[in-house]
Image: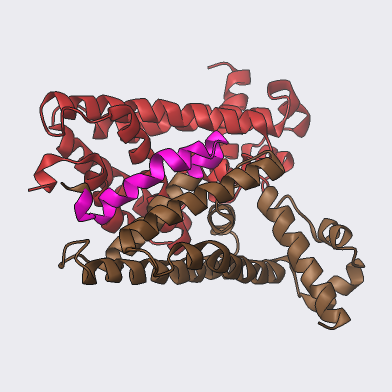
Chain colours: A red, B brown
Amino acid sequence: MSKGQETRQRLLDSAQQLMYSRSYSDVGVQEICKDAKVQKGSFYHFFSSKSALTVEVLEQLKMQMIKSILMPAFAKDLTPAKRFERFIEYAYQYQVQIKEEYGYVLGCPMGNIALEMSTQDEKIRKKVEMLFESIFYVFVDVLDDAKAVGEIDSESDTLELAQVCLAYGEGVLLMAKTKNDPEVIKQLLPHVSKLIGFKANKQ
Amino acid sequence: MSKGQETRQRLLDSAQQLMYSRSYSDVGVQEICKDAKVQKGSFYHFFSSKSALTVEVLEQLKMQMIKSILMPAFAKDLTPAKRFERFIEYAYQYQVQIKEEYGYVLGCPMGNIALEMSTQDEKIRKKVEMLFESIFYVFVDVLDDAKAVGEIDSESDTLELAQVCLAYGEGVLLMAKTKNDPEVIKQLLPHVSKLIGFKANKQ
């Protein structure tokens, strides 16, 4: 990595961490530069604005979420239903760890920015919408597997169910953040199996 | 209403409308005063800070939500399952109307502030947590009715189901805001009946 790339990466990492723990609006370019140990003048060499930086932060976040939670949780060594159980456990453990580190359940970094910024910055709104779409396809994939092995009804609309799962996951993380309690995830997220209609839960 | 009460009310209404359409952090005391046509000096006669004002705005919001959506939707002239259907229709219509007025789906004003402010202002976080609890009890009531008339299983844990409903509703509103599309509500919210386990949906 060149010195320029390293500087750019430090700005991304500082912005991600500061915004996730507080909010987009509460963190300014000056603070991001200070945290990243970068001169403010250099910032605009790398990013045209805080908004442009945030779009890149969101992309980085998505990659991290997919790599550290979604891919390992939904790896195909387990049945689709068991993959969902592992996903719930990983999502819970992640927020437990976040609370230990920051003192707060920080919830979903994408959902946070979506609710704060969707009416104020169209590029950010569109970016979050696209990121949710990437996660949506991860759900479609596991739901299609569930259908193929007969764990869910053969007539299930997996495209719609994937949207339902995503919405429920975001809602549970919102409640966990509001209550500042990761146990909310462990208590509420397993109900997702009723939304999906896993046959084991119908018996 | 005295002149002082009227001034106070104008500040609350301006803050509510400005914050709901943008965000807490994006709206300052100066702009609230300008919108409410109140001298900035008077602001601190009524509220000790923007945070204190916001706690009162949240209380006002809750009362409006209960009066304009929750009470009419869950009125006992229909069966519990039908009340949920009416709630979905009202929540949808409300966001359709909001989008016509503002150009954006604004989602849940309480959820918005929860995700933006929960790590930054403990009084605001606690207030949103309490407001969600008020709404939670509205759900408990209708779910208990559903249990009493046999629409859901007699062993259903209505306290847990009410939390599940609340989380799902917030998640659906989050997705509708992110996609800036009220149709998301109409498409996804009816799946709440699977979470509740209405017997008609099992047949």
Nearest to the observer: residue A127 or residue B15: B15
Place residue A133 in its image quadrant.
Answer: top left
- Rendered image quadrant of residue B79: bottom left
Q: Is residue A100 visible?
A: no
Q: Nearer the viewer, residue B86 or A50?
A: B86
Q: Is residue A118 magenta?
A: no
Residue at 18% over, 25% down: A145
Q: Is residue A183 above or below residue B7?
A: above
Whether the magenta-drawn stretch holds residue B181 is answered as yes
Task: Give the quadrant of residue A67.
Answer: top left
Q: Residue furthest bottom?
A: B2
Residue sitting farthest toward the left: A203
B189 on left or right of B30: left
Q: Is residue B64 left or right of residue B71?
A: right
B132 w.r.t. A7: above or below:
below
Q: Point out residue B51 in the picture as x, y percentages from the top left corner.
A: 68, 67
**Residue occupying the point 57% across, 16% down:** A2
Magenta residues, dominant SS class: helix
Looking at the image, which residue is at 30% across and 49% down? A93
Q: Which residues are magenta?
A: B174-200
- Nearer to us in this view, B149 or A148: B149
